[in-house]
């Protein structure tokens, strides 16, 4: 069971990075955290993927006062998403034409939903940014939707100031990410079999 969870986790994280690369190539707007990452990348001259990984590691430091405990999925998240994004960005040729950019954007958003469902469904630990949200919720008692919205609005605004791309893709991602996750998470969620069923199985 662990091997299956681990493999699903790795595939989900790599595909998440690929979805980020597709959104960058579409150049029609990124999700809030990616706007922030892109802004930092332009400010520092470091690759987008390196910034994604570095920010994830820094967010883990904030987990300490929040008393969040990372899992193996958390560590893999920090190492793989940005790396995958950089590799895919290096492999992708430049794209021209609005129709192709729109296709890249739609494909990226759907792939992101599937990838998120896969790595969360593996059940091996939340990503750094997800853990930040749940940690603040536990510490403050505020509703998760308001905490998540507050964090994402803050990083989106800061990323925009730094030069990250906000556009129709940002809005489309915000509107569809929740519904897509609701579709994909049950498809990929791995649940341990009840003891009775496991014993009765041939």
Image: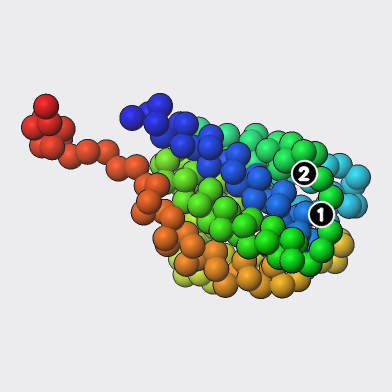
Distance between mark 2 and mark 1 Cα atoms: 8 Å
Mark 2 = which residue?
A: 92
Residue 147: tell me if it is visible: no
Which of the 4 quarters of the picture holds residue 173?
bottom right
* Residues at marks 2 and 1 touching, judged by CB atoms closer than 8 Å: yes
Classify 99 as above or below 14: below
Q: Is residue 33 left or right of residue 43?
A: left
Mark 1 = which residue?
A: 95
Residue at 60% from the left image edge and 47% from the top image edge? 16
Q: Residues within 10 Å of mark 1 (few under 14, many from 20)?
A: few
Closer to the camera in the image, 16 or 133:
16
Q: Is residue 41 left or right of residue 58?
A: right
Q: Please provide percent x and percent y for residue 146.
A: 54, 71
Classify 166 as above or below 121: below
Residue 99: tell me if it is visible: yes
Question: Secondary structure under badge 2?
Answer: loop
């Amino acid at each position: 069971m662990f091997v299956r969870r681990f493999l699903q986790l790795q595939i989900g994280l790599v595909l998440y990075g690929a979805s980020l690369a597709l959104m960058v190539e579409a150049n029609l707007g990124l999700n809030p955290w990616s706007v922030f990452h892109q802004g930092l990348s332009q400010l520092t001259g470091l690759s987008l993927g390196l910034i994604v990984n570095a920010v994830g590691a820094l967010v883990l430091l904030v987990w300490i006062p929040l008393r969040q405990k990372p899992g193996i999925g958390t560590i893999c998240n920090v190492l793989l998403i940005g790396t995958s994004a950089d590799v895919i960005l290096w492999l992708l040729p430049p794209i021209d034409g609005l129709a192709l950019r729109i296709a890249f954007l739609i494909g990226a958003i759907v792939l992101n939903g599937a990838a998120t469902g896969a790595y969360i469904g593996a059940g091996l630990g939340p990503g750094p940014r997800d853990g930040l949200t749940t940690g603040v919720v536990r510490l403050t008692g505020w509703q998760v939707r308001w905490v998540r919205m507050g964090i994402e609005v803050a990083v989106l605004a800061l990323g925009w100031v730094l030069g990250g791309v906000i556009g129709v893709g940002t809005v489309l991602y915000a509107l569809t990410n929740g519904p897509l996750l609701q579709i994909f998470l049950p498809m990929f969620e791995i649940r341990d079999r009840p003891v009775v069923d496991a014993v009765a199985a041939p």
